[in-house]
Image: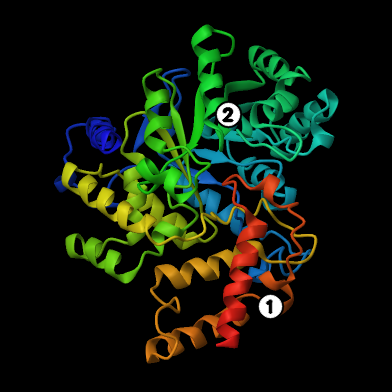
Amino acid sequence: MGGAAVATSVVLSACKSNNNPGVTPTDVIDGQGEMTYRINPNSGDKVSLLGYGMMRLPMVDGATFRDNPNAQIDQEMVNEEIDYALEHGVNYFDTSPVYTRGHSEEATGIALSRHPRNSYYLATKLSNFSPSTWGAEASKAMFENSLKYLRTDYVDYLLLHSIGGSNDELGCMEMFNARFIDNGILDWLVEQKQAGRIRNLGFSFHGDVEVFDTMLRWHDEGRYHWDFVQIQLNYADWNYAHVIDSDNVNAVYLYNELHRRGIPAVIMEPLLGGRLAKQPDYIVRQMKEREPETPVARWAFRFAGTPEGVLVVLSGMTYMEHLMENVATYSPLRPITEEENELLMKIAEEFVKLKTVPCTACNYCMPCPYGLNIPAIFAHYNDCITEGNMPAGNPEAVEYRRNRRAFLKSYDEKVPYERQASHCIGCHQCESHCPQKIAIASEMQRIDEFVEHLKQS
């Protein structure tokens, strides 16, 4: 209850922080003004509230790496989308050495190098997840390669990528130390910042709150200064991240701890991996009753952009229509009102009761060595829950039999048989890469048993 009270006061505090402070929500129409910007208090950067996440890039002929390991990024489309983004005020672009099977930085560099370097802010990460990259020279090489692929001699925003995780051998803090402290890499990155090759240094967080708290304690003590921090924030995770996934930390805590220190927050997963754009019909009706023409996803993007301590809200925009829709949402931002916040908190409570798998389709778990399409399996399962088509209740009932047939038919259509959950051998190789700390092998077994039960019935 205390968290809910804090949530209202914190979110609504941003209503005065729009770059058009004299404009009230009823005075504007989405997409009929200029992009909303926020100022980074540490650097003075004027950053677009909408940031372009370069994780899910368009592919030639709509191919995917899951189905075709030789699939190619559609560079022409990437160029067109980045051109449109810059023309409409988006100036923050976020990538990583591991995005799009390691090709995102190069594609991003090609597209952005066609524009003046001072017209955009470039964010990338030190994604040294594998023990083979924990050595000082390997981690340094990763950073140098990022500069080469991005066609630049400095990075505006450099992140320690996805801290807070663990593996079978190391706990969360031990893992962080192995990646950044024991090898001297964090101190080396500070030196690169002093040399001007990094303008802002921060981290992205998934996982153990002890690691998050330790990073902020170091900030308070002056050991390391964080210019920004990337966190997962949406209206479901605001108060219920720990319910959606017991290993996650509520966004209200993460945001408040950053905001009271004056550390800008960069937001990832505003749609919770797209799940907040695929709400059940009864939830969609609640939103449509208030604003019939407003897309469901826009509610989530407005919520994520409302807190005044938020610098950027990232969105992975594969298609031009996604980009155009999100640009409209933030041109300018209509901050969430008190009444709307109450509605979203109610919807969040209903959403967490759906018991979906907390997969955000980041694809860090891929490729599976045994060929499973892990994100697609979870997506199909979650969609059946959120769309109200999950077989449940009396197996003899007409609705159960209809949903059973629909579940099995769509499962075969969306996930080829050889890539379904039944082929999981429980090797657990994927789990150490999952930012959401999903027990993937256990979930695969549960889904496979459910599918077999449906087949037998």
Q: Identify the coloring.
A: rainbow
* Residue at x 29%, y 43% (from the top left corner): 333
In the picture, the disc for residue 137 is none
- Alpha carbon separation for disc pair 1 and 2: 37 Å
- Residue 197 x, y percent position in the rendering: 67, 21
Q: Which residue is mark 2?
A: 203
Query: Which residue extends farthest top?
Result: 222
Is there any visible trace of residue 320 in the rendered image?
Answer: yes
Q: Nearer the viewer, residue 451 or 96?
A: 451
Amino acid type assigned to the residue bearing label 2 in the image: Phe
Q: Quadrant of residue 351?
A: bottom left
* Residue at x 63%, y 22% (from the top left corner): 198
- Residue 434 x, y percent position in the rendering: 63, 48
Is there any visible trace of residue 48 in the rendered image?
Answer: no
* Residue at x 43%, y 26% (from the top left corner): 264
Callout 2: few (<14), some (14-19), or many (20+) C-alpha neighbours within 10 Å? many
- Residue 425 x, y percent position in the rendering: 76, 64
Q: Specify the quadrant that holds the C terminus.
A: bottom right
* Residue at x 22%, y 63% (from the top left corner): 286
